[in-house]
Image (tube, rainbow, N blue to C red):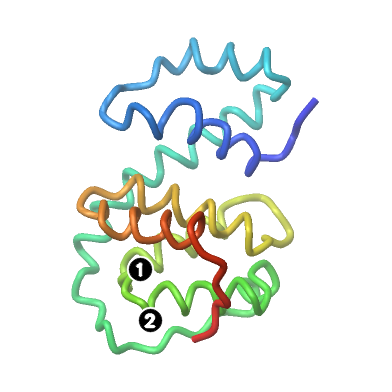
Amino acid sequence: MNENIIDLLLYLFEHYLYDNPEQAIDRTRVHNNLREAGFSSPVIDKAFDWLENLSEQYDAARLSANISQNSLRFFSESEQEKLGRQCQDFIYYLENTGILDAARREILIDSVMRLELEDISTEDLQWLALIVLFSQPGQEQAFATLESLLFDSPVNYEH
């Protein structure tokens, strides 16, 4: 049985969200399909809750749009533990290149922190950043840029 929530989020993204972004998901049908694929109900529910929270955070992002783009972000101790140096550098890179604005940066960090995992790999963070951008209205260009960056060219994420 597969218990990795990131694997489940990627599966949902690749099989249900990416090709049909405007189409509402039949949660019961998808839940049953995911159970058949080997995911447990508690992990499925957590993944759905995580995705639903992303769409709710869009309103919070609009309210926090006045976050200065010149502000400097320091990671808390718990963020540093979960997001190692490479993940932090990746987030800084996304922000410095304009892929993430300050509000989306905070959504990404908050979303990752809500995952009940001890640490996150850079590869997992890249996928989570794609999912976060995909879920945010008006971020289509940022999503396309990140998607192209991740799949079309090897990059060293230094800020």
Q: Is residue 95 left or right of residue 136?
A: right
Is disc 2 placed on a helix, strand or loop? helix
Residue 76's place in the image compared with 140, above or below, is below
Counting from the top left corner in percent of width and height, residue 155 is at: 55, 72
Q: Which mark is residue 79?
A: none
Q: The N terminus appears in which quarter of the rendering?
A: top right
- Residue depicted at 48% across the width and 12% down the height: 28
- Residue depicted at 40% across the width and 68% down the height: 105
Task: Report which quarter residue 144 is drawn in.
Answer: bottom left
Counting from the top left corner in percent of width and height, residue 128 is at: 52, 52
Q: Is residue 93 left or right of residue 137?
A: right
Quickly name the residue at label 1. Answer: 100
Quickly name the residue at label 2. Answer: 96
Name which residue type carries label 2. Answer: Asn
Q: Nearer the viewer, residue 148 or 109?
A: 148
Is disc 1 placed on a helix, strand or loop? loop
User: How many discs mark residues in the rendered view?
Assistant: 2
Residue 82's place in the image compared with 46, above or below, is below
Counting from the top left corner in percent of width and height, residue 129 is at: 47, 57
Q: CA distance from mark 2 to mark 1?
A: 8 Å
